Amino acid sequence: MVTGVSGWSLLLCLSTSERSCLRRISFSRLQRQQTVNLIPVLIEAFSDAGGGLCHLYTRSHLTGSDLPMRPYSCGSTNQKLEIPQDSRSPVGTPPPGLVATVNVHVLVTSVRPLTSFLHDISVVTTNQEPRGRPTKLRDFLLQQLGPMSSHQALGQVKQVIGEVLQAALTNDKKQTVNRCVLCYQLLTFTLLFSGSITPVIIQVDADLTLSALSDDTFDGQITKDLILEDTLHFLLTTHTHLSSETQMERRQYGGCRGTNSLCLSDDEFLLLLQFQRQMTTPSAFHLLYPSTSSSFSLSSSSSSSSSGPLSVSELLIRISRYYELQRNLSSRHDTQVSTNQESAVSSSQDRAAGKGGCVDPHLRQIYTDPPLPLTPPFSPWVKEYHAEVTFDTVMVRLRPEPVSSACRVHLDEHGGPRMANYPVGLGNSRISILVTDDGEPEPVVMTIYTVHVYRESRPSLPMFGDHVTCSFVQDCGLLVRPGRSCGLQPFIRSQSPLQTCSSGHEPGRWVVPCLSCSDNRTCDWREVAWQPDGCYHPLVDRPLLQDCMTDKKVLFFGDSTNRGMMYFLMERVNSSLEDWGKAHDTLVYRNLNGGRTLVSYSYYPQFWLEKKRRPTFRQALLTLLNRSRPLVNSELTVLVVGGVQWLNTNHLRTVREVLDRESLSNILVVVKSLGMGFHLPVDGIRSLSLREIQYLDKENDNIIATAKYHGYEVIDTFGITMGRYKEFLQGRCACHFHEVEKFWASRTPDDTMSTTNRTRSTRAGLSSQSAVQDMDQEAGPDALTYHVRGPVNQVYSEILLSRLCPRTRK
């Protein structure tokens, strides 16, 4: 129980613990300096359990009062509110009135007497903007109604809210004497404007609610955080002043001394002092009640003071009017000074002074979905963060929010979006957040924040005892082939000896040892292997591979997934990878295999160029052939063509036409088929629906059939990547199953031997582990070298090698 405890000052009851707080707190026994964010009388008045607005509305009709409410306010608080349609005015008639629903947020800091404040941020919903948008209430009314009417409308907003609050307090039958003087309640009022500047209240929530804002854009979370921050700053600043100055001022003004002959109790004095501090605290909250335009005038208060002492309510009105007058005088003075300065100072000096520019280039918060636990915890002054996510988290939505609205935020590059979905590949990913000043002709980067996200590998349970072998073709989270089973299934091995596969596109499945095929958490995913149906792909040992590749020229033509296979081949042949780059043009490597093998590569399609400037498939292929010459018309020349999802049967016919015309019809052509990717809704790139992915599967079959018709080899990467589509690595397309890491190698021969043969082929399937492969003394001490990692890429790249160097070829 917190009752009677003196060691705390502020208690925040979350919406989920509201009932518990009300049961455990005895509000009549709280000490004067203790603050709780609940006021029981308001919760009872506006909650569904207490009858809510329905009870207030019914009572107002019985008593003859006319509260500014609508009857359907009595419905469920989850009911969708309908906005009246705009009236269509004939030509020459005045425009229709304001039609909108507006959520405003009211902070009640006292109930007897009533004091409340209105936050300047509201959420506006119209027929043109049904999802709602956060905006300043004054700006919205000014834009819709003009200066004069908007001022009147704001006054009407304050008046109708004040009337309903007073009715709720009048309805309180308990009239508790002992109360929490410093307690407060944040309420959400939903107002309906239907052609008049006077709104009606259609809903009241005894909490901060922002249901009209979209969760996808973080507008609700950002607005809620902003209002809560303003609330705590407003209250805590006041509370700090009260704690430090109350004793001194109580001696000067408390009791019956110095306050217009009014004898003040300690509670009343504390209330007045709190209100005075709130009126002088700069904040986004503005006085709502008592209204400075109350019918209680200065003259009447003066006359009442001559006949008797003022009440506390009358003192509150006097305080509010005094500070409102001071604020108006200050505003006029600031306007005059600003006008004089503008006439005397040039625009360049204004910019130098930071007027209108990004003078505070920091972030207020980084919003993510799902929430990322940042290390260290976020602070505007810390520029680099790390976060870890589980294997099943494949995408993160990110929206950084700047401190100053004059600053702009771009993700990854100058022209990047302010908010985006990021695919999170296995291992490390990096997100750059640029805070810029876009007021210059060219945006200027002021600050860069970096978020490093590490995504864990699939959870694996090592096998120490008995286990079963399970298999899967596709994941149940993405049913590419609806007619086939998904997820883990029991796998029964063939009792007959397996033969070497006769092609690289034999259908197959992934096999993995598990304790149970009904729970993928019991599997040893380090031992997952690709098992073709009825055959196996042999692993080509390096001596045989080097001998097989002697005098060959291997030409890779395609996108980055094709390039990943090329670098894997180079590392396997050369025993190390000493050169690497994310090339988007043509590369030629002549030093492979001791200078006995040439590898070349050309990127296609060059999607970043304007369509009229892009080389056609035929032109790009001819460029690669010409850069790789001289070429022999035999299987000593190999062309590997393909990519993620751009290849089609027409391209294969073009390959045949070009090779025939160039007298290269007898070279070995290997087609890399389609692959998984573009299945996540990532901003700025295309995103495929499930139906479109299923269509790709059928198109992949057509590509394989066409390639076989032309006598080409095929590596079916679509079937291999389909079941492990979540295991992509870095890249926005979620289509890369490889990445290249660099390191300084300083190894002894003994160390080298321990890292070889990590890829193995058995008659049970082709297995791979993402480890540094085949590094030996050729790299030399302290040599910069690279390694192609990625177990899925490793599997289909090894299949490529087995097709380039078969023991026999029909």
Image (spheres, rainbow, N blue to C red):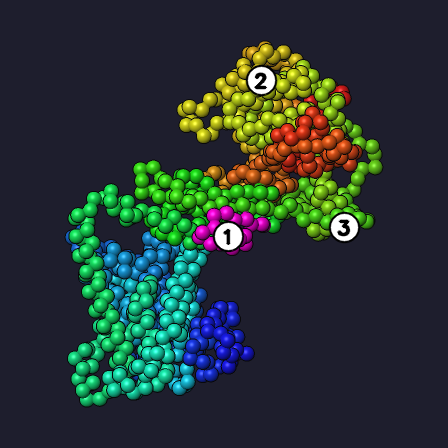
Residue 369, label in figure: 1
Question: Marks 3 and 1, how far apart in space?
Answer: 34 Å
Residue 727 picture quarter: top right
Q: Is tag 1's residue or tag 2's residue first in the polypeptide sequence?
A: 1
Q: Position of residue 569 (x, y in %)?
A: 65, 26
On the rendered structure, is 249 left or right of 338?
right
Q: Residue at x 44, y 47 (%)?
A: 419
Question: Neighbour class for label 3 at 10 Å: few (<14), some, many (≥20)?
Answer: many
Q: Is residue 375 magenta?
A: yes
Which amino acid lies under the numbered mark 2 shown in the image of this protein?
Answer: Arg
Instruction: Quote the CA–CA distance across marks 3 and 2.
Output: 50 Å
Q: Which residues are magenta?
A: 369-389
Q: Amino acid at mark 1?
A: Asp
> Few, some or many C-alpha atoms within 10 Å of disc 2 (few <14, some 14-19, many ≥20)?
some
Q: Is residue 89 magenta?
A: no
SS under mark 2? helix
Residue 523 rendering spot, x and y as whole percentages:
72, 48
Mark 1 secondary-structure assignment: strand
The reply to whether residue 799 is visible in this rendering is: no
**Residue located beneath label 3 in the image:** 515
Residue drawn where x is 25% and y is 80% of the image: 314
Q: Earlier in the sequence, mark 3 or mark 2?
A: 3
Q: Is most of the magenta stretch helix, strand or loop? A: loop
Q: Which quadrant is home to the N terminus?
A: bottom right
Q: Which mark is residue 656?
A: 2
